[in-house]
């Protein structure tokens, strides 16, 4: 490849898919039978590709991506910064919604750039380590017996930290779950909890948070929405256990506010501005001595972990849980050994999908060229 004539995007394909779970799972009082995703494939003049996927999460993600994806046509992957700037536009009004579409576009351009250069994303970012801890997520259809069995099995496999999703509204149920986890995890292994924005005020949150703290929780995630940074700060001031927040924050400015009140930040490349947004948050965390635990998409987010020691762990919903079924269509899955994700030398951002097989589940498609 010559930098004088780099390959440019000649076609962009956008696809919305409803992917069924292998079996229904429950989260609190909600039964989950499928997940909705939006995936993007960029095709370049040399035949190379770049891929990206994001959770729909009740948003019109397909339409948001469709607004910005055409801006990549005719552009090389090396000009992803210019594409991102054009997509953000001259005024801030649309950015809060368009950022999720922009995030997918940025990821796909980074993926293509790595594949065209024959380099993995972590190498392009500048590797600092070849392994990063993985943090499995459990708590779907939770009972004390199931939590105990899962914690014991994950600890035996080498995972040092397990995240447990709790109900957040029933202290007795949550206490039973965490007691089971504490009893099953051997010395040197810990659990964190995810409250899923269950509370409105620090006073509502304190009983469960203090119980979790007394049991040795490694962190408490999402007590409130990330925009409630004052409430997050007020709660953190009354606890010794760190709070982890930010999976829906869209840019470095939002993370800058949260960094003042919470020790652990939770960026998501598919939400927070793509790989370029992750880089900004990693620099922010390094400057302010904050830790990162990226939100889901472990194959992609592991690259940041290999390139930045601000990453404490990379979150992963294990395939046997079945709650993130897009993993059945990924062609570049994490390499796991002893509870760690291992860096590999496959080019790109580890976002490539079995596009044709996934297309059988498409509910909507559009092509741009």
Image: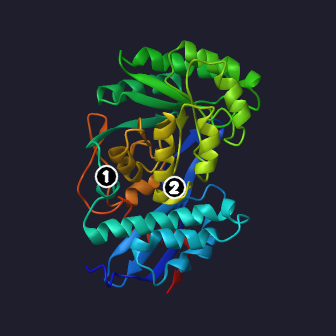
What color scheme is it? rainbow
Which tag, 2 or 1, sits closer to the chain's start?
1
Percent position of residue 55, x then y: 55, 57
SS state under label 1: loop
Q: Which mark is residue 180?
A: none
User: Does residue 141 show up?
Assistant: no
Percent position of residue 295, x then y: 50, 45
What residue did someone put label 2 on?
277
Q: Say left or right for 282 vs 33.
A: left
Q: In which quarter of the image is the N terminus?
A: bottom left
**Residue drawn 59% across the image and 44% down it:** 255
Q: How many labels does the image show?
A: 2
Percent position of residue 19, x then y: 51, 59
Category of crowding for the residue at label 1, using alpha-carbon neighbours closer than 10 angstroms: few (below 14), some (14–19), many (at least 20): few
* Relative depth, front residue between 367 and 105: 105
Q: Quadrant of residue 272?
A: bottom right
Depicted 237 relative to depicted 159: above or below: above
* Relative depth, front residue between 16 and 109: 109
Q: Determine the CA span between mark 2 and mark 1.
A: 16 Å
Q: Quadrant of residue 353?
A: bottom left
What residue did someone put label 1 on?
126
**Residue drawn 65% across the image and 41% down it:** 257
Q: Say left or right for 61 vs 346.
A: right
Percent position of residue 44, x then y: 37, 81
Depicted 212 relative to depicted 341: above or below: above
Check contact, mark 2 vs mark 1: CB within 8 A: no
* Relative depth, front residue between 307 and 302: 307
SS state under label 2: helix
Q: Residue furthest top?
A: 214
**Residue drawn 58% across the image and 73% down it:** 86
User: Does residue 76 show up?
Assistant: yes
């Amino acid at each position: 490849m010559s930098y004088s004539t780099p390959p440019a995007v000649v076609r962009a394909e956008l696809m919305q898919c409803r992917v069924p779970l292998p079996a229904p799972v429950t989260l609190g009082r909600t039964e989950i039978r499928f997940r909705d995703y939006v995936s993007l494939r960029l095709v370049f003049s040399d035949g190379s590709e770049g891929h990206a996927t994001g959770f729909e999460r009740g948003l019109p993600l397909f339409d948001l991506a469709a607004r910005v994806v055409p801006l990549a046509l005719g552009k090389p992957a090396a000009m992803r910064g210019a594409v991102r700037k054009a997509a953000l536009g001259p005024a801030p009004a649309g950015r809060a919604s368009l950022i999720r579409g922009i995030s997918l576009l940025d990821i796909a351009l980074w993926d293509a750039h790595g594949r065209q250069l024959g380099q993995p994303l972590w190498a392009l970012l500048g590797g600092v380590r070849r392994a990063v801890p993985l943090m499995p997520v459990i708590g779907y259809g939770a009972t004390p017996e199931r939590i105990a069995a899962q914690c014991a099995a994950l600890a035996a496999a080498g995972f040092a930290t397990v995240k447990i999703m709790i109900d957040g509204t029933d202290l007795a149920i949550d206490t039973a779950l965490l007691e089971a986890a504490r009893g099953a995890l051997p010395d040197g292994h810990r659990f964190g909890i995810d409250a899923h924005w269950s509370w409105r005020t620090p006073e509502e949150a304190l009983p469960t948070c203090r119980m979790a703290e007394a049991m040795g929780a490694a962190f408490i995630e999402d007590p409130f929405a990330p925009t409630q940074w004052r409430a997050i700060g007020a709660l953190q001031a009354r606890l010794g256990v760190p709070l982890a927040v930010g999976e829906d924050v869209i840019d470095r400015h939002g993370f800058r506010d949260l960094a003042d009140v919470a020790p652990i930040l939770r960026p998501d490349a598919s939400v927070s501005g793509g790989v370029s947004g992750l880089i900004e948050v990693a620099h922010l965390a390094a400057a302010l001595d904050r830790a990162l635990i990226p939100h889901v998409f472990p194959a992609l987010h592991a690259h940041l972990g290999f390139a930045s020691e601000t990453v404490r762990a990379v979150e992963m919903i294990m395939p046997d849980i079945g709650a993130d079924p897009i993993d059945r269509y990924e062609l570049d899955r994490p390499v796991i050994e002893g509870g760690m994700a291992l860096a590999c030398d496959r080019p790109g951002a580890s976002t490539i999908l079995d596009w044709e097989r996934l297309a059988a589940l498409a509910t909507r498609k559009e092509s741009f060229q």
